[in-house]
Structures are given as structure tokens and as C-alpha cells.
Image: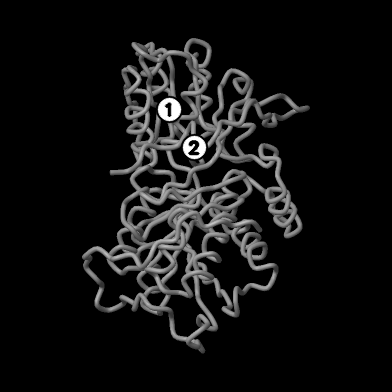
Amino acid sequence: MRVTKKLLLGSVVATAALVLAACAPNTAAPAGDATEDAGPSEITVGIVTSETGPLASYGKQYLDAFEAGLDYATGGTGEIDGTTIVVENRDDAGDADKAVTAVKELIGSGVNIIAGTASSGVALAVAEQAAQNKVLYISGPAAADAITGINEYTFRSGRQSAQDVATAGTFLDDVEGKTVAVFAQDSAFGQGNAAAVEAILGAKGATVTPVLVAEDVTEFTPFAQQVLAASPDLVFVAWAGATSGAMWQAMSQQGVLDEIPVVTGLGDAATFGAYGEASEKINFLNHYFSGAPDNDVNAEMVDAIEAAGGTADLFSPDGFNAAIMIVHAIQEGAGDVDAMVAALEGFEFDGPKGTMTVRESDHALIQDMYQVKLVADGGSFVPELIDTVSADEVAPAEAQ
């Protein structure tokens, strides 16, 4: 594993924050058989993500890859420099209250490294707990831009909505004077995408019109008709979860895909058949599919996940990256939160998607993205890489 620390800061000065008196841990390394020159004998990492609920498949992708990444980053030992890394998983079921309860319990037991969360709303709530209790939090796969720069203790191991939108923009020519409709769920994820389209394409002169749909809606015909009636020049679709198939069916049946150019993010493998005959009419931006990157780390991740009976999928890099980041943080910081934060700021490493860089200023994870199309393969569709979009080209604006 090649890891390079571009800039190692001194101790980070913590901002003033409310601390939960009942469960706030000391920011120093957890208790263990430590010596003056060595870290603790054992550090527990709390993984909080969806094992059940609407985003359970995303949680499984993350967890399978995290296990593979931890094995990769520790050379199969599960330890680094004499410190054993213990992983404790908690299911948040996509519910922020359950996640916060789990995080409080973990912190109360002395855990000061938290990772995971597939839902943006959950991640924002966990990030608040990280700031209040001064613990390290590495979010992923949650994509809301608001997570980046939210506080000094929060990082991310995946991409964010602004990187999706910037990748969508690479499919377009001049957008000045054009109208872009954002068709999305009325959630932190959907709202984040609408805000990102406004910030990125709106800044280039586009008029952005959000069409937001409540998360509990199951009949999408009226909303597809609303998009069609607006006659935008482009439709950007941001959607996640189990209702994707019904939404795309409505968009196709109402003629949106025939009348208006549509761009969206290519989801996980389970969704490849959800677009039906419309598949080849859609422009896809992509965070990851197993055939996109061509490097040794990706090959090792895919092989490890498959050997364990799983399949590398959309959010596998997020789990694998998180493990690499946590191992590096523990190696450099020995469980001390301020030292681990400093170790991750500016950290550059080889992940499954190639070179990954943790931006020092706001902890955005700078990474390549992909242009993809779906092509017929027998009775199904498979992704095919059109182009790799460089990390710098789609880097989000720095959070203020």
C-alpha cells in the first residue's frame, strides 16, 4: 500500500463545543497496555450504517469492502504497529435517531473513531455528535455536500453531490441560458443535489428548477408529467433506494426520456436493469463500477470481496477507503483524536479509484469520476466506461 502524507500538521486546536457529560470520552488514546513509545494495545472502531432499511444494500457494500480494506491496509493482521483494531458494527436502519443512539453508546463505552452511514440525513446527525464529543468521524457513502467542512472532526471516504453534478456538466456544452430541472427526492440527498446543481451549473448561467418528491411517494406519473410540461433543456435526476425502478418507469412511460436529455448517476448493480429499454437513452455519471478503474488496488479489492462471497459495487470504494484512512490515522495518531485528525488532513493514498486526496481545508475527498453508458448484454444491461474525468476537473468548491 502506497500512502503519502503531503502535510502533517501539529496538534489541531479543538473548537469550543458542547460535550455530552454522560458519554464524552477523553480525546487521548483509549486505555490499553500502552508504553511511552507505543500506542494502545487495542483500539475499537464503531461502524454505524444501514444493515436493514431502504439503504441496506448500500450498507452491505460498505461493510464488505471495509473488511477487505482493513485486511489490505494491515497486511492481513488486523493490527498496525502493535495496536489491534477491533470493529464494532451497529445498524442505524437509515434512521438518524437510531444512529445517534448507537453513536452515543459507542462513545460512552470509550470509542473515539466512528465511520459509516449511507444516508446523508444520518451522516449530518452523526457529524454533530462527532463535534460535540470530539471524536473522529469518517462518513461514507452519504453524499450531501453539507457534510464536507461541517466540523474539524468529520471526514468522508466517498464522493459528494458536487462531484456528481460537476461530472454531469462534463456531458454538456455551453449551459448558459439553458434550463435545468432537478428531479430528486425531498431528502438531504435530494436537496443537496439541487443545491449543487444551482451552485455549479447555475453559476455557469443555467436556470435551475427543482422538482422534489416526498420519500414516501410510490406513484410518480404526476411528477414525470410536471417535468415534461416544464420543457427544460436538461433533466438531472438524483435518486436512491428501492423506488428507483418505479420512478424510471414513470419517466419512460410519460415520454420524458424521448423528449428531453436526461443525465443521472449510475447506481449499484441491482439498478442496471431498472431503466429497461430507456437505458441507452440516458447519460450516466458514475462514482464507481468494478470495471471502471484499472489499477492494482481495485483488483485486490474486487478479488477480496469476491473471495468472501460478495460483489464489488457502487459504494465498495467508500468502505475500502475508510479502512485505509482509519489504519493511517491510528498509525500516526495512536488513538489521540487531535493527532488522528492532523494525520488525515492532506493525506494522499492509492485507493480502488486511483489517487485519493483528503483536502486539508475542508476534508473533501478529491477523486476521479466516470462517464458511463449502459449497453445491452443478452437479456440485461452492463456498464461500459466512456471516459475518466480527472479529480481536479470535478473537485468541489472549498467549503466556507
At 37% from the left edge and 23% from the top edge, which residue is drawn? Answer: 201
Q: Which residue is pictured at 34% across the width and 78% down the height?
A: 26
**Image x and y of residue 257, in percent:** 52, 16
Q: Amino acid at mark 2?
A: Thr
Q: Tell me if 178 is positioned left or right of 317 in this view.
A: left
- Residue 84 in percent (x, y) is at 58, 78
Figure check: 55 above or below 330: above
Image coloring type: one colour
Of the numbered discs in the image, which one, if any, rests on residue 243?
Answer: 2
- Please state the horizontal and vertical placement of residue 251, each as a whole percent of the image: 49, 21
For mark 1, does the 10 Å Cα neighbourhood hold few (<14), some (14 to 19), or many (20 or more) residues? some
Q: Which residue is mark 1?
A: 220
Q: Quadrant of residue 108?
A: bottom left
Q: Estimate how packed mark 2 is, as few (under 14), some (14 to 19) or many (20 or more) residues with alpha carbons within 10 Å.
A: some
Instruction: Specify whether 358 is left or right of 227.
Output: right
- Look at 33% across and 45% down and name the residue there: 146
Name the quadrant of the N terminus: bottom right
Report the front residue among 87 and 223: 87
On the rendered structure, is 275 left or right of 302?
left
